[in-house]
Image (cartoon, grey):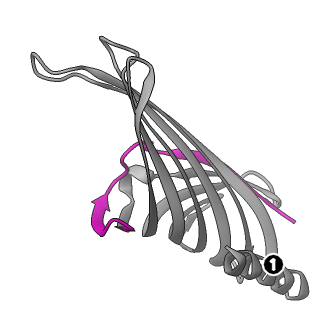
Amino acid sequence: MKKVLISVVAMLAFALTSNAQLWFGGALGLGFDSNMTPMGAAETSTFSTQIAPKVGFGINDKFSVGANLYLGFDKTKDKDDKDNFDKTLSWSVAPFARYAFAEIGDFSVMAEGTVGLGKSKFTNGVAGVETSVKSDMFVDFVVTPVLSYEVSDHFNLEFGMNFLSVGFYHHAEEVNEFRLGAQSTGATLGFIYKL
């Protein structure tokens, strides 16, 4: 964690002493899912939310680097017995690089690659009582397309298309996953403010 903090401070110092443009931003994600299953199986509903503040600086008009913090929460309930649940609380710190490969007027299409280090805590509950809790450290590499709209010289709105992301995830329990698309939230709405 100290190395990540030192890296972020170093990036901020570089941005303030160079011609790079410093910017701050973030994204919010919200998701709802209802799972209809075959006869005899439990139907579930899922609520998920994410918040991801970030800081970065533009090296030039097309290329930026920075770091973001991610906090996420998912909860799945049994529709018939709402006291049965699974929930996940996750956090990660992730340096990123983004490249704008297409610009049309005030719109830009970017690819953002992140390398994250984080931890997830999984909790299961039956009849409203937590029955098991386990934690898992993970490292991931994810590339996500982002659509950006320049509202003014200092303010952009961003739409992260998580449903088109490509990623590789390595878990401490020696589980490796390759994913195409998102598991929970299909999109995030965010902004950046350029100093």
Position of residue 99 measured from the top left corner of the image (x, y, whole percent):
56, 75
Quadrant occupied by the C terminus: bottom right
Any part of residue 51 in sight? yes
Q: Position of residue 74 (x, y in %)?
A: 47, 37
Locate residue 40: give its quadrant: top left
Residue at (66% x, 58% y) in the render: 106
Secondary structure of residue under mark 1:
helix
Is-magenta flag for residue 174? Answer: yes
Q: Position of residue 183 (x, y in %)?
A: 36, 47
Q: Nearer the viewer, residue 72 or 192?
A: 72
Does the segment drawn in magenta span residue 161?
Answer: no
Nearer to the camera, 156 or 16: 16
- The residue pinned by badge 1 equals 9
Q: Mark 1 belongs to which amino acid?
A: Val
Q: Residue at x 40, y 42 (%)?
A: 184
Q: Which residues are magenta?
A: 170-195
